[in-house]
Amino acid sequence: MTLKTPVMTPEQFDAWVLQPEQAEKAYEFIAGEIVEKMVSNQKSAQIGAKILAFIIFHALQHDLGRATGEQGGYMVNSERYIPDIGYMSYARQSIDNDEAYNPLAPDLVVEVISPTDTAKEMRVKIANYLAAGTVVWVVSPDDEQIEIYNPGQPARVLGIEDTLDGGAVLSGFTIALKTIFKRRTEETKPSAQGLTP
């Protein structure tokens, strides 16, 4: 939700967002406007959490870097974004950052589309991420697709039969899209026969 606020500079936004009355909310600064991050839906949140878990496990296992969830903010050019997932390699930032918005743009971001995301905001964010050298994965839960944006390369779209890989940014990482979008239904639940309370 875009807030109706006076026009701000990035520096004014940085001061405004740290005021005590903003402490319980999360905000992005997109194309000069303050956008409150709204609660997603369960489907988008679960898919984002699943991808984050796989990235964290892989990064820890291979000592590659760190990942943040939907509370990790980043400065991207003159804007401030809070992607669903942000990944930063140790090669680019070897020590932890404790600022509200990391001054370095991440190596990789994952944006999981939810009903509160607008096409305009997503286009602006993708363009700015790419200009900062960030790889972008845009996940569409409804279409069961992932759009891959690499700086200087044509976009690719992966479908349910494809495998996502981390490329040069997240070396050795692979996951089948079927795993990401798998849903538990009555037919897939294990039987409770023979179990005692």
Image (cartoon, rainbow, N blue to C red):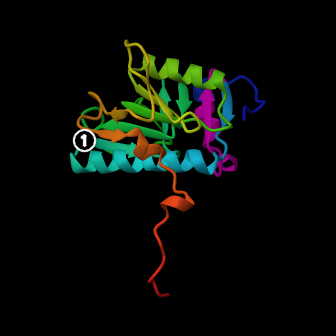
| Left or right of residue 92, residue 53 in this image | right
Q: Which residue is mark 1?
A: 64
What is the x, y in percent for residue 160?
Answer: 45, 35
Marks counted in the figure total 1
**At x 62% / y 43%, what residue is drawn?**
26
66 and 146: which one is in front? Answer: 146
What is the x, y in percent for residue 131?
Answer: 44, 16
- Does the stretch in magenta take in 184? no
50 and 76: which one is in front? Answer: 50
User: Which corner quadrant of the image does residue 178 belong to?
Assistant: top left
| Left or right of residue 44, residue 180 in this image | left
What is the x, y in percent for residue 59?
Answer: 28, 45
| Left or right of residue 107, residue 28 in this image | right
**At x 56% / y 48%, what residue is drawn?**
45
From this view, report whether residue 78 is shown above or below residue 186.
Answer: above
**At x 35% / y 44%, what residue is drawn?**
55
- The part of the chain drawn in magenta is 13-32
Q: Amino acid at mark 1?
A: Leu
